[in-house]
Image (cartoon, grey):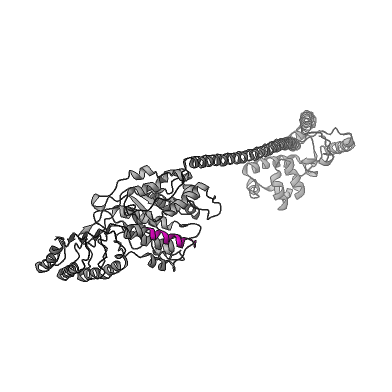
Amino acid sequence: RVRVTMPSPSTSKLGSAEREAAAAMELLQLSRARLARATASAGPAQTGSRDGQGSSCSSDPATSASSASVTSSSSALRGLRRPLSSLNPDEVSHLLSWLELDAYAAPLRAAGVAGAFLTGSDSAALVAFGMKAHHAQRLRTELLALEEHGVPLHYVSRPPSYCLGCLKCLGQVLPAAKNAATAQEQEAARVAAVEAASAEATERAAQVANATRARAAAEDEVRLAAAAAAAAQAEAEAALAAAQAAVSLIMDRVASACCVRWEPLPDSPTMYADPDTIHEELAAQPGLRLVPPVRLLRSDWIISRAAELRASTSAERRRELMLPRRQELEELEPSAFYTAEEVKNLPRGPRNAGFPMAVLAVSHSWESVGHPDPDGRTLVLLAHAITTAQTFQVSKGPYTWQTLPPRVAVFFDYCSLYQPPRMEGQKPMTESQHEALRAALARMQVWYAHQLTTCFFVTDDPQINSARSTPYHERGWPTFEYHVAAIGKAITSSGWPQLVDVGIGVDTLFERGVPLTPAALELLLESKGFTDGTDHGLVLSLYKKTVQCMIIGASRLIYSSCEWGPNEVGAFAAAWFSLCDRLEHFSLATNPIGPKGVSAFCEHIGPSTLPRLKFLNFFNNQIGDEGLRCIAELLRRAPPHLPNLKTIRITGKNDTTPEGKQVLEEACRARSIKIEG
């Protein structure tokens, strides 16, 4: 058997795992051939000892000398044997390695097992050291042969790892070669993965660069498009301004050629009872470049807008729902307005109520200088009042009023009149808008004082007054609107309530006081606040024109169901009777004036007072016999008072007796005056 020294891994010159594996296979074949020859020449002793598996496999010239010396020493040891009982623990360990029982070599050496123990031991003793039963049986068979023939010296002189010719050694070389090949494959795979990752990263970088360039190009296109859009918008605005200027010039020339200039219509005693007065304010005026002075809102639009406002949760959305100026609303939502023709076709109230129009004028105070209702509280309160008035019938005693019509045209100054810019970003008014606003302000009283319109007064209420610095009745314009509306509107259960104080409640009847004289209103306005100081003179002038037509120049004055008592009758008579030279019909029906009220009436009647009065109505006034005697005494005065009086009505609940009526009949018979009742 040939022994060679295994070169250390550090001096191995294998070029690759493939060459190492080929060399190992070649060495295996050579070792098997030499094993066969050694077995044939060594005899039976060597054949059973499994020691003929060596062969030199070193082809490196640097190791040839050491291989020769090992071979010669191995030849010297061949045929030398030792008794099994003479082996020490280390030699027993080498023997187990040669017998391919390496796993048990270390435990036996640690236990100090020598050859003497193995000589007399059986399989059970070997199993006690952790050896498996079949391994112990095989070892015991080998030991019996070694006891008989002796142990070959090279079995105990060194372990089999020094012999390249050993099949066991080859079994270690081949896995190493395989591991080396696997490592090389893994390295190649790693290099390929790195190269692939690098290529992918390069491609990704190229894609990012392309995307960056595309984004830059897109941004350039966006900037160019934005610049083009801005230029187009500027061009469009310039074209629009030029068109508006051209239209304005044409209208000026047409107006000049036709001598058309807007002038307010002359006031007349009948203008506040004529529906055409309202229609004229809504019609396009030639003298105003065909712009209507006033636009009226749809009540259903107000209700819908208020519902959106109540449902909004963000402050930004509430700002978006703020009521816009008329000029913005005409552009954004033109459908929010009624046309003049649509207002004319709205259903009107019953005949007994005077055919009131479905037109509602709103009196409210502004919560800020820039906007009347920045938080939308007035809008919500107004919408609630409208819906309530459209569904709830007001009652008092035996009388029940009708509900407000389902469709109403609403006058709300901020949306119905053109407004100057008061907030940042608002455009200034055009010249035609200026003229329309001046025309509307010149007849502002019509919307409140007209006998056919309905007025809602959004007075102080905890829900809306919390943000106000000045209460409703401390402001100039609301004070004017409140008093001018109470001058001539009828309060009759034949129609719906035409005066409603929203702050008090839609379900509560409005109690109309005695109309103020212009002097009394002027004194009252001195303590009220105006945003624009020049408005003080304007509202006073409007009030004077109103009372001139509706009281001083009126032929009929009806103050029925006003809840007036003797004091109110006396105050009205003292303030107005001396001025009412054209009055022909006067009614205090359904007021609890009593006999004192009749006395107050008679006290302010002089020879020249109410010279044209023909009809005097004391229906349902609870005047009693005392009141009848006051009237009879008035009629007997000389010179004759109320010279043109023709009829006196005393029907209804007046608590009179036949005796009292007889006194009045005698006085009326002398003057040819008719008594009703």
Quadrant of residue 585 in the image?
Answer: bottom left
Q: For residue 170, which quarter of the picture?
A: top right
Q: Which segment is the magenta one?
A: 529-545
Quadrant in the picture for residue 620: bottom left
Q: Is residue 198 visible?
A: yes
Question: Which SS type dominates the magenta stretch?
Answer: helix
Q: Is residue 100 left or right of residue 583?
A: right
Q: Is residue 292 above or below residue 639?
A: above
| Front one among 390 and 217 | 390
Position of the C terminus by quadrant:
bottom left
Between 534 and 111, the residue placed more toward the observer is 534
Q: Is residue 526 above or below residue 176?
A: below
Q: Which residue: 41% across, 46% down?
A: 337
Q: Nearer the viewer, residue 534 or 165?
A: 534
Question: Residue furthest toward the front?
Answer: 639
Query: What is the quadrant of the N terminus in the image?
Result: top right
Q: Tell me where residue 126 appears, x and y as whole percent.
A: 66, 47
Q: Can residue 179 be seen from the camera position used here?
A: no
Q: Is residue 531 magenta?
A: yes
Position of 31 compared to 130: left or right?
A: right
Against 95, residue 573 (above or below) is below
Question: Does 395 appear in magenta?
Answer: no
Residues 136 and 211: in front is 211
**Left or right of 235, for residue 2:** right
Q: Position of residue 372 (x, y in %)?
A: 46, 57
Query: Residue 284 placed where, x, y %?
Result: 43, 44
Note whether 600 is above or below 535 in the view shown.
below
